[in-house]
Image: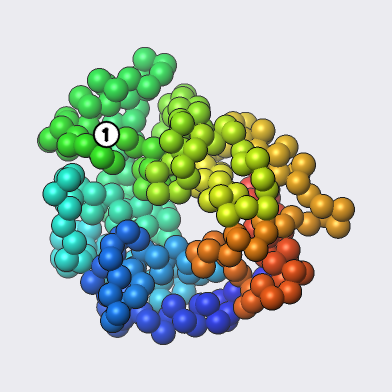
Amino acid sequence: MDNKNSIWSKQILEMQQEDGTWGLQFHTLSIPTKKYPLTTEQALRRLMILGFDVNDLPIRKTVNYMTACLRGERKMDNSWDKSHNFPLFTKLMLSTWIKIFEPDNEFALAFASRWAEVIEKTFKHGKYDHNEYVNAYTMQFVSKPKGGREVDFSTFYHISLLQGMLTPKTESLMLDYVISKPEGIYYISSGPLNIPPKNFAAKNTSWYFAALEILSGYDLSNEKLGFAVDWINMHKDADGQWDFGTKANDGVYFPYSNSWRKAEDRKADCTYRVMALLKKWL
């Protein structure tokens, strides 16, 4: 399925600035403006879902810009949140998105290694130990976690950044912790991942899939998420397709096709996404 030439791709690419960003705001939750209705992170996530990678010039430009920001050569945006260590959070956001598109980027890997060391120490006793987490965090980043996202690594950024960075033992322990966490993965899901949505044709199913897609980047994900595979296969229809329903059209993960006016286009989009995930576990 070629989504790079869809109307959605064209709309996003037309808003990209010459420096590779989509304006002054980076983070998804930043307040958009009339001049810049889309944040850079929102654009990156949507383009990634539509099939763009670092070999595409628009992504290459953004990765270069983010790397320059991570190295301190450029400023990312004008945001500042005093509720946490924003310079550190900035490095986390940048490193995560750089590593997603360019896994061997040395600057992103260097920051990911620091977080991996924190997580290794957090689970060194065979389970999550909050005191060990705080101590390891403080030693690594020279300050105690202030609150919010700093005291909880079960977020889109951390889970994405840590792929391929942990020992098998720690990866197993961390995945067990994240999958059973009542709050799910922050910024992505809002419930425990070991309990799939009751209704398959629902908007929250799309976000549940987003969490599964992130976790699928871990070597042990197939072993840990077998229950999700069973749940997915249970909801395949008689034609061998899947349907998330019309409410799943959130402008982020769906649609791929230009329109969902026809049910067959919606089902084709949903089935494409499901199959892409299942192939990672074959």
Left or right: residue 236 versus residue 159 is right
Q: Tell me the crowding category of disc 1: few under 14, some 14 to 19, or many 20 or more residues within 10 angstroms, Cα based.
A: some
Q: Is residue 111 above or below residue 263?
A: above
By what rule are the colours in the image chosen? rainbow
Mark 1, residue position: 151
Q: Where on the picture, by quarter, is residue 125? A: top left
| Residue shown at 22% from the left, 58% from the top | 70
Left or right: residue 4 versus residue 58 is right
Point out the residue furthest to the right here: 238
Point out the residue furthest to the top here: 125
Q: Is residue 152 above or below residue 17?
A: above
| Residue shown at 76% from the left, 46% from the top | 235
Left or right: residue 214 versus residue 39 is right
Callout 1: helix, strand or loop? helix
Q: Where on the picture, by quarter, is residue 247? A: bottom right
Q: Is residue 220 above or below residue 273?
A: above
Q: Does residue 2 appear anywhere in the picture?
A: no
Give the amino acid at mark 1. Val
Position of residue 196 measured from the top left corner of the image (x, y, whole percent): 61, 38
Viewer-nearest residue: 46 or 201: 201
| Residue shown at 36% from the left, 79% from the top | 16
| Residue shown at 52% from the left, 42% from the top | 215
Quarter of the rendering occupied by the N terminus: bottom right
Position of residue 209 measured from the top left corner of the image (x, y, whole percent): 58, 49
Position of residue 101 measured from the top left corner of the image (x, y, whole percent): 43, 60
Q: Is residue 161 above or below residue 147?
A: below
Position of residue 202 measured from the top left corner of the image (x, y, whole percent): 62, 52
Q: Does residue 84 appear anywhere in the picture?
A: yes
Total number of numbered labels? 1
Left or right: residue 146 versus residue 178 is left
Quarter of the rendering occupied by the C terminus: top right
